[in-house]
Amino acid sequence: MIDISFLYCGKESRSVSHRYGKRVSSNLPQGERPYEVPASSGERRPIVVWNITRTCNLRCLHCYSDSEGKRYGGELTTEEAKAVLDDLAAYRVPAVLFSGGEPLLRQDIFELSVYAKQKGLRTVLSTNGSLISPALATVIGDAGFSYVGVSLDGIGEVHDRFRGTRGAFEKTLAGIQNLVGVGQKTGLRLTLTEGTIDQIDSLFDLVEREGIRRVCFYHLVPSGRGREIFSANPVKTRVGIDRVLVRTRQALGRGLPLEVLTVDNHADGVYVYLKLHDEGNSRCEDVFGRILWNGGALYSSGVGIACIDSQGNVHPDQFWTHYSLGNVRERKFSEIWSDPEEPLLKKLRNRKEHVHGRCRACRFFDVCGGSLRVRAEIATGDPWASDPACYLTDEEINISR
């Protein structure tokens, strides 16, 4: 994740310590305590994305798990899931993100979230929001989730088309309003594609109107059904990121308590630095030091991000589901993740020796880390090739073709 509100505008959140090695000041919103500051970015425990079920009530065009409204066999039982939570707590992961499918369709989701909280784990709920009635919003608020992320890929028919369901937007918007109404910290998530970048301003308008405190813009990773979606071209991507920067600065300038992030493209951190440099901003070099400490993708998939699927398979991230590192029914997650001889993990944790091409020649490699290896693999068949989603010019990264 690239924290736009912090890097571009200087607004701290409790995650800044984990992402950028900076001790956070004490003026955070009530009830929010900062993450611990890791000794180094490479020593961070992973945030675990747990696709707790594959079943979903929608059929989204860009779904990386290719989920739909049917039951899938072999999902972890409640007791098996609790054993995983025991291990994650003992391993001191910073957070567990319950995702899917649609996690609210798993009957024991609140039993598991309460259990995780009792174990001292921070929990996040990732949902399409369409099932959240006022009563369910209250249950979610009582379950101890530190944050609920709701996917919203545009306004009205744009969202409905992405979700494959007529009327999905109105249901999701009602779910968001119900969550905000009970005081649950809630954020929106939009996937940046050719069809959704034009929705950025409308989404910011909605965020400000509804009192939402967090918004994340995800660059497309074409896995699962997402292989059928076209990524935005570099020019349009830059236009979209520029709008995110402008609207973030405007919102924070008016004093709105908004956290804005981009996800799944570490070129965004470099782009923010270049913008600050061009603007003559005095924070420019400090920001460069923060993103250099973070290391971008050098410490993301296989280091700072992990995934457990509904059947207990462990993956380097949620998009790399075609490669299993092991299964929690056979070995604890902590043992799988700590295995020094796992071939893919070894390379991901030492990717400087393996990434080649334009990414490796880039002067910002130590800041970006070559971005998403799984996107390179999907596009080229080679996980160490250049990430095709980089939108920085040859001149900006100081290479010549």
Image (cartoon, rainbow, N blue to C red):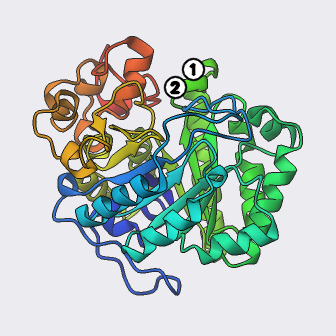
Quadrant assignment, res 56: top right
Mark 1 touches mark 2? (CB < 8 Å)? yes
Report crowding for label 2: few under 14, some 14 to 19, many 20 or more residues within 10 A (C-alpha): many
Rendered location of residue 16, percent (x, y): 37, 67
Q: Quadrant of the C terminus?
A: top left
Q: CA distance from mark 1 to mark 2?
A: 5 Å
Identify which residue, 21 or 138, lies in the foreground: 138
Looking at the picture, which amino acid does disc 2 mark?
Ser
Rendered location of residue 279, percent (x, y): 46, 54
Looking at the picture, which amino acid does disc 1 mark?
Arg
Quadrant assignment, res 370: top left
In the picture shown, does residue 296 fall above or below 139? above
Which residue shows up at 64% across the image and 47% down it? Answer: 102
Quadrant assignment, res 147: bottom right
* Left or right relative to 169: residue 76: left
- The reply to whether residue 11 is visible in this rendering is no
For numbered disc 2, what is the local secondary structure? loop
Rendered location of residue 377, percent (x, y): 37, 19
Which residue shows up at 40% across the image and 67% down it? Answer: 15
Label at residue 212: none
Which residue shows up at 17% across the image and 27% down it? Answer: 343
Label at residue 223: 2
Report crowding for label 1: few under 14, some 14 to 19, many 20 or more residues within 10 A (C-alpha): some
Residue underneath mark 1: 227
Rendered location of residue 187, percent (x, y): 63, 61
The total of numbered circles placed on residues is: 2
